[in-house]
Amino acid sequence: MTNWIDAGARADLAAKGRRVLKAGTKQILLIADGDKLFACNNRCPHEGYPLNEGSLGAACTLTCNWHNWKFNLESGETIVGGDRLRRYPVEERNGRIYIDIADAPAAERQARALANLLEAVPDNDYDRMAREVARFIKADGDPLDPLRHMIHARAAHFEFGMTHAFAAAPDWLGLHESAKNEQQRLTALVEPIAHIVWDTLRQPEFPYTGDVTPWNADAFVAAIEAENEQAAISMLNDALAHGPQLASAVKAALARAALAHYQDFGHSAIYTRKAFELIAKLGWSVAAPVLKSLTRSIIYATREDRIPEFRHYPKALARWPAPAKAAAPGDLVGLSVNQTLERTLTLPGDEESKYRLLLEASAIAMLRFDTSVDRHTDKPVSHNVRWLDFTHALTFAHAARELCTENPSLWPQALLQMACFLGRNTPFINGEVDQAWTVTDPQAFIAREQDALYDHGVREPIYPCHHVKTLRAVAEEVAWAGDGSLSRTMLAATNRFLHSPIKYHHALRSAHQALSFVEAEG
């Protein structure tokens, strides 16, 4: 379909060689370069400055003088810059100029925006990503498709599998669903896309095997335990080929693998829950890239129960449970790893009761985090403790509750691993709980903090990602737990976390530890 408009007489261009026309919301620059005629968007696709104030050089090159972006009007190539300049077909007929201002079909514009979105990846160009997603939506595209597209394009670039780029995506999508305006909606879509780009920047592809082996849950878990990616992925390929009908079986197997060890600082369990949340929000079309990257991440996960600090964990698990003793959440705070494991063995009540005690204890510890530890510059690597060491105790618990509710046999592992979090953080808490962090209106607090996430102001995505996932995990746990000390303590701890200064770069610390390490090498 065409829509030719009369743009005036060719002779009228003789004096200046260019003219700006308006057609609805379009602002079109008409240029005569010798015998050639060109029509393009007068707004530079970079930041919208007027191209009629630009410079026309050799070889039909138009330069935007604000940032030196250059466009070849004949070929449509962007010579310097990123985004493509829209050009319009133009013809001269009997001394008059006609411009076809018809928009390309929606499907074509959507495909162009998705292709251009990937062009922003090598430069990690956040602003261009935002523009291309906005262009896609303006072309009546499904707002979630750019994220789907980026997941498929970049999943194989995660060398060690899934990161928080995928794990926080469902939380950003939750913010997209509750957004109050266009700006918030676009922000919540671009943040996970940009995080994927950040985490895979300049990484080559690390392909997954295309082999297919019949799905067997026990063999799949064993392959992950043996760190045999080819065997695990080949079975996953078969499960994926069956579509969603095996989704619950795959999730159960991945939950077993994720909780088989106290591992990877809780990431494996968190990622398992979040992977399936992401699939639920985006559809089965992303199951293959998401679940393959999840499987790879669990394969590469550190098994921290094999280091001296946590060697008591498998011993405690083998003795689960011990005779019950009365306990309060505060009884679990301030103990060593071994002491916390032993105390957890004797917690009273059913699994949910034990979980509540451990979760509240974790929140108390978070309220008592000695933040001066995060600022040190003269201690060993073992003291590199920060807020995330404490927030992970809550987000791990949040993930574990769902996984264990669906697979009750995993409760002992999850509860004892919560104990490991508590014990490992004991050296880094102090004896004070500042009541100033108490939240008096939970709904207003959560709404206010969610609004703040849309404009978090932190460039490196791992930090705002932890803000969004911690806040939303706590909001869900509060909704589940109901009124009471557990919810009050979690909210206070989250309030303190979200409003405490974070040191994002530790130059002196790194220098001190590098010198100490090199000196010890002899």
Image: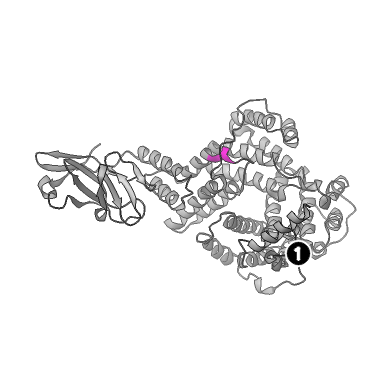
Question: In x, y percent, where is residue 164?
Answer: 61, 49
**Residue 70 at what x, y percent from top left?**
32, 48
Name the residue tied to disc 1.
428
| Residue type at the position of mark 1 | Phe
Q: Quick check: is 288 in the magenta stretch?
A: no
Q: Dot 1 lies on which element?
A: helix
**Image quarter in which the N terminus is found:** top left
At x 80%, y 47%, the residue is: 305
User: Compared to 425, does 256 lie above or below?
Assistant: above
Residue 68 in view here: yes
Above or below, comparing residue 226 to residue 386 in the picture: above
The front one of 340 and 327 is 340
Is residue 237 toward the left or the right of residue 431 in the image?
A: left
- Measuring from the top left, give residue 385's x and y in whole percent: 71, 60
What residue do we see at 63% from left, 30% from top? 239
Magenta stretch bounds: 154-158
Extreme residue in the front direction:
522
How packed is label 1: few (under 14 Cα within 10 Å), some, or many (20 or more)?
Answer: many
In the image: residue 7, left or right of residue 124: left
Q: Quadrant of residue 292?
A: top right
